[in-house]
Amino acid sequence: MVAIDVMGGDYAPNQILAGALSAAQKAIPIILVGPDQLIKYELSKLDPDWQSYPIQIQHASQVIYMDNDPVHSVRQKKDSSIVKMIELVKTGKASVAISAGNSGAIMVAASLILGKEENIERPAIAGLLPSMSDKKILAIDLGANTDCKPKYLYQFAELADKYSEKFLGIKNPRIGLLANGQEDCKGSFLTKEAFQLLKQSNLNFIGNVEPWDIFNNKTDIVVCDGFAGNILLKTLETSVEMFTHLLKKDLANTHTEKLFQIENIAKNLALSSTGALLLGVKGNVVICHGNSNSQIIEIAIKNYAQFFQQEKTLFQIKKFTI
Amino acid sequence: MVAIDVMGGDYAPNQILAGALSAAQKAIPIILVGPDQLIKYELSKLDPDWQSYPIQIQHASQVIYMDNDPVHSVRQKKDSSIVKMIELVKTGKASVAISAGNSGAIMVAASLILGKEENIERPAIAGLLPSMSDKKILAIDLGANTDCKPKYLYQFAELADKYSEKFLGIKNPRIGLLANGQEDCKGSFLTKEAFQLLKQSNLNFIGNVEPWDIFNNKTDIVVCDGFAGNILLKTLETSVEMFTHLLKKDLANTHTEKLFQIENIAKNLALSSTGALLLGVKGNVVICHGNSNSQIIEIAIKNYAQFFQQEKTLFQIKKFTI
């Protein structure tokens, strides 16, 4: 059972509901979390037969908005869709919670309600980045912690190492530290201190890595603070989008089939990071981009429902299909 | 006259010399800075007639390597190619210096020898990023200062604003601050403080910007610390490279002409940032990627020789041609 925050994201509730409905129509059982009446009204508009699909509704009267302070809003809005969604994971009613809402609030709610894993001070967002081959690279943190201490980066590495087998099918994965150069002397004050912690650990630390090393399969895991990770992820996605746009403009006289192929390759690059996992909390929580549309929500639901039911590695799901 | 550090970069001296020779063969006057005998020997191998082109040699017996400490090495190696190259700008013998070597050392040498501009504590690397249209976006800092104070980011904005007309042909340019979200509340401790400084200034500050806003022309200038800027630049370049690789693999049965077109678009995206300018010092200094090959060196020489001779805006040089 997948719990979905209907009120989270730039295109909530419509696009979230459309994506969730589409997943339910493909027999994936879901619980929609948000205002009861609104959900029913919107679903009826989308499909008058919505009740014939495996859809449950968990009422939540409040909304935590994108610009709300995470800690304050989670404490104040006990009946928000984010809090209620996380509670469904806590009570075991859902195996995974998915939201495109305020990622800071999701992290706070998950930490408070589910609890943090042992020796982890800050949960972090981990996602799979594409590479030159079919192999994916696990990146952590993609945006949960904009300001980090060196020990947090070390803990992110520990988390990624622990989950590597599950997500990548790799034991004792190579761990790289994102920096502005491969040389040991490169990096910021933060990464230089984290470098020493990682070097002294039992992890399979390979040193500093640059973006090129990630896409070129020189590492299995890339560790960074949430600010740099967020820039990395968004630059990758928008570069591909820009390139596709320019290709389509320049290749306008090309066969439609080729353009479709180009778009498909771009889609697989961009979507490979759809729905990142919050690691470090005791439960399965997936955070989607704020700008997720119905297609992306549907893909996230389908992939993670399958993943947490079968406990197969995400790596085996090579291509995301709509 | 363009001064070129023959010993800087991963492929020095061969690729640097090959690129410089090629530019000289197209009538661009150059001064090659490095070990006299080595330069003559290598040039003779490349072209026995090299003396018929506008090539001068400035002897420099020492080399500052990529992993050398910038401050220490500039102070110790007075006869290094980087120091000698910057001195040629100081004495007016060269209008611009170009190096693919240790960027920290180039920055230190330029600061010490040329001096810093008024009210600028840290020179920064500024480069032009591509966008969806033909317009380029001026990004600063792309890697000179991995650890910044809020006031440095403010000074980078002042520098970019000052040079905007020259580089972009734009007066009173829109200035965005790179962050992990557009909302005012997003950002790290560093960017949040810089945000306030920029907001209180007379600059045309438009707030936080994300990678998507850059490529989508929502801003003319993007300000960031050198760590994040370096990740942004390298992720853009390697994403395009990865995408091109995957396209070529998947479109293997396509007409050669189309593949050539794709490669050309990719090249124009990647090369648009070739040769970034060190702003904040009293002289023209261009820093190229450490992995620059002869082609890139030649393009940098040609573009910047043209730019500093004609004082036209870089924006007008829409496409880099080999």
Image (cartoon, coloured by chain):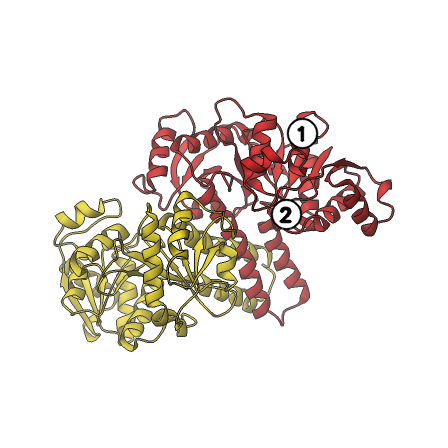
Chain colours: A red, B yellow
Looking at the image, how many numbered discs can be counted on the residues?
2
Across and down, in percent, residue A4 comes to 70, 39
Q: Chain of mark 1?
A: A
Residue A1 is at least partly visible in this image: yes
Give the residue at x 18% y 72%.
B51
Decide which of B63, A187 is in the foreground and name it.
A187
Q: Which mark is residue A87?
A: 1
Across and down, in percent, residue A246 comes to 55, 65
From the image, tell me which residue sits under label 2. Answer: A9
Whether residue B222 is situated above or below residue A81 in the rendered picture: below
Q: Quadrant of residue A71?
A: top right
Q: Secondary structure at mark 2?
A: loop
Decide which of A210, A108 is in the foreground and name it.
A108
C-alpha separation, residue under disc 1 versus residue under disc 2 = 19 Å
Q: Which mark is residue B244?
A: none
The answer to which of marks 1 and 2 sits earlier in the sequence is 2
Q: Quadrant of residue A311?
A: top right
Q: For the residue marked with disc 1, what is the amino acid?
A: Glu
Q: Could you confirm whether marks 1 and 2 are on the same chain? A: yes
Across and down, in percent, residue A139 comes to 50, 39
Whether residue B218 is situated above or below residue A59 in the rendered picture: below
For label 1, the crowd category at 10 Å Cα-Cα, with few meaning under 14, some 14 to 19 and many 20 or more, is some
For label 2, the crowd category at 10 Å Cα-Cα, with few meaning under 14, some 14 to 19 and many 20 or more, is many
Q: For the residue marked with disc 2, what is the amino acid?
A: Gly
Decide which of B53, A286 is in the foreground and name it.
A286
Across and down, in percent, residue A81 comes to 68, 38
**Dots 1, 2 in contact, CB < 8 A:** no
Q: Chain of mark 2?
A: A
User: Which quarter of the rendering shows the N terminus of chain A?
Assistant: top right
Q: Secondary structure at mark 1?
A: helix
Left or right placement of residue A71 versus residue B20 in this view: right
Residue B276 is at least partly visible in this image: no
